[in-house]
Amino acid sequence: MKRFFFILVAFSISILANAQSLLPTEFFGLEFGKKYSPEQLILHVGANGIYVDSKTDIKLYSIDWKGYFFQNVTYEGQQYPLMTLLTRPDDVLGLVLFTIPESNIPEGQTLDSVYDVLLGDLSSKYVFHDYTSGAKNAVAKCYIDGKDNLLMISRQTNDGQESIAIAYIAMAFGYNDALNNLTVIQDTFFGMTLGSKQTAYSIKSAVGYKGTYLLEDPLSFGKVVTFKDIMFAGNKWDFGNFSISDTGEFYELSVNKSLDYFIKDDRQEADRIYELFKSKLAEKYGKVEEVSDADGKSISYYSGNGICLSLSNKKCRSVGGDYRLYVKLEYSHFGIIDKLSKRGDDEL
């Protein structure tokens, strides 16, 4: 039961977003930021759940926690098989986690149907951001309000069993130290800052002799301006793509190296480039967990300034249909991307 908690909280340091609707900070009369003894926690939950266990040596991101575990909990009319209350060593409440393992799904329902109902209810109140963590077998949707409180709904797999988890986290109390240590990710390239207004002409002028203009391609809500043989971060890349919205917002830069998947030397070169930039990023922003799948591997960084940075080395089909290896370095303004995505959803 305690393991569900660890993977879920691993998401929270990595994603920050702007939001407006405030999240609840009180549960069963227990308020984030206030001190409670174990007896008080149990008393407040009362008939809404059954206390079963505690753990006093939980450590996440160099932060110590104490966890209190309950079963068969009812919150806002919803029944949850498991709930975890986490406090700091000074007994300040900072996190409430509800978990529904697949084995506890009622007869006649599925994990998918329960997840869809829960997500639908929460989405009627809050605008979520999709986020895939470096943690294996886990995916989450996150929302952060204007007071640094975070809500997360996720599906994750532990020991072969899938579960749904919903977490309310008081980031100001629980992760203040970690948040203060977050490094702001680079957001200005060739003199252009992500989020600024740009045109194809201004991008061409900014890149100048460092790349050869190739073409412009329309997107659903904007365009991408592509260069070949572009110099960036001390390396010559085969292609560089600059994405701008239909209102001129510069929201993404990606550069990539294309290599033949079936040639050993090319595969080794792809690995060399990937490992070189992985090491450089670790030096600048710190180490993060690498994600691997059948197509390759990648790492990602998220920052409070709204920028996502990813590096990947993956196999995929080229425009011509051949398998190629692409080493890609990408910087994205996820606030603008989220806004464009919502416009697309509105057309459905």
Image: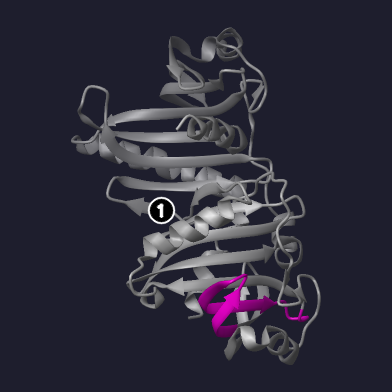
Q: Is residue 300 visible?
A: yes
Decide: is 158 above or below 283.
Answer: below
The percent position of residue 329, horizontal first and vertical second, equals 47, 35
Q: Horizontally, is 275 left or right of 144 in the view?
A: left
Image point (51%, 56%), residue name: 119
- Name the foreground residue: 347 vs 71: 347
Magenta: main secondary structure: strand
Q: Secondary structure at mark 1?
A: strand
Image quarter of residue 148:
bottom right
Question: Is-magenta flag for residue 57?
Answer: no
Q: Horizontally, is 11 left or right of 155 in the view?
A: right
- Name the foreground residue: 305 vs 209: 305
Q: Which residues are magenta?
A: 69-91
Q: Disc 1 marks which amino acid?
A: Val
Q: Residues within 10 Å of mark 1 (few under 14, many from 20)?
A: some
Image point (62%, 22%), residue name: 249
Decide: is 188 above or below 166.
Answer: above
Q: Horizontally, is 107 left or right of 201 in the view?
A: left
- Name the foreground residue: 97 vs 252: 97
Question: How many labels were placed on the picture?
Answer: 1
Image point (71%, 67%), residue name: 174
Q: Is residue 227 visible?
A: no
The percent position of residue 233, horizontal first and vertical second, equals 54, 30
- Which residue is farthest right? 34
Residue underneath mark 1:
291
The percent position of residue 79, horizontal first and vertical second, equals 53, 75
The percent position of residue 251, horizontal first and vertical second, equals 58, 28
Image point (64%, 78%), residue name: 85
- Name the foreground residue: 272 vs 182: 182
Image quarter of residue 50:
bottom right
